[in-house]
Amino acid sequence: MLEPKELKISPMQKTWILDLDGTLLVHNGPYILGRDEFLPGAEEFLNNIPQNDIIIFLTARGEWEKVHTLKFLKENHVRYDHIIFGAGQGERILINDNKPDGLVTAVAINTTRDEFCRTKFVTDHHMGTMDD
């Protein structure tokens, strides 16, 4: 899906699967800038993800980049639940089932490299059920 202006989401707990380079951080920042750096708006976005939601970072960064990546995230107080290194540079494919009430449970948004996601996520309390 191309980047929509607005996306209605349910009030249910979510799992956010986010790429690092070019999505949250300047692509190749350690090599171009000598350090990692958030894209404008990315840090605020991360800080506004509800505490009960799950955050998973994916990155094509290899093991040799793990130490400085984890240090950057810790120094910047970035909350996350899991991080997967070496995730490959090709497509990331998410397959999930829809809820019986019709809630679409898999969303993919492609952004322009080094421009943080501009989609406005709006909670629609009429979407989703807590019963599955």
Image (spheres, helix red, strand yellow):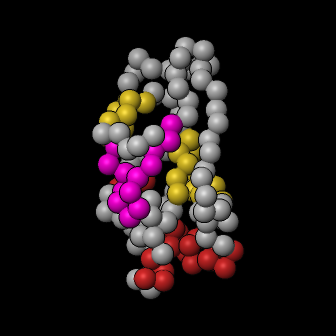
Residue beneath the point at 32% across and 58% down = 41
Is 49 in front, or is 114? 114
Q: Position of residue 2 (x, y in %)?
A: 41, 43
Q: Position of residue 111 (x, y in %)?
A: 40, 52
* The magenta segment: 107-119
Q: Position of residue 98 (x, y in %)?
A: 59, 23
Viewed as shown, does residue 108 lie left or right of 112? right
Residue beneath the point at 44% across and 64% down = 22
Residue 43 visible: no
Residue beneath the point at 55% across and 14% down = 101
Report how many numbered discs are placed on residues in the image. Answer: 0
Viewed as shown, does residue 63 lie left or right of 78? right
Considering only vertical position in the picture, is 7 above or below 119? above
Q: Position of residue 44 (x, y in %)?
A: 35, 56
Viewed as shown, does residue 20 lie left or right of 41? right
Q: The N terminus is located in which quarter?
A: top left
Is 42 in front, or is 112? 112
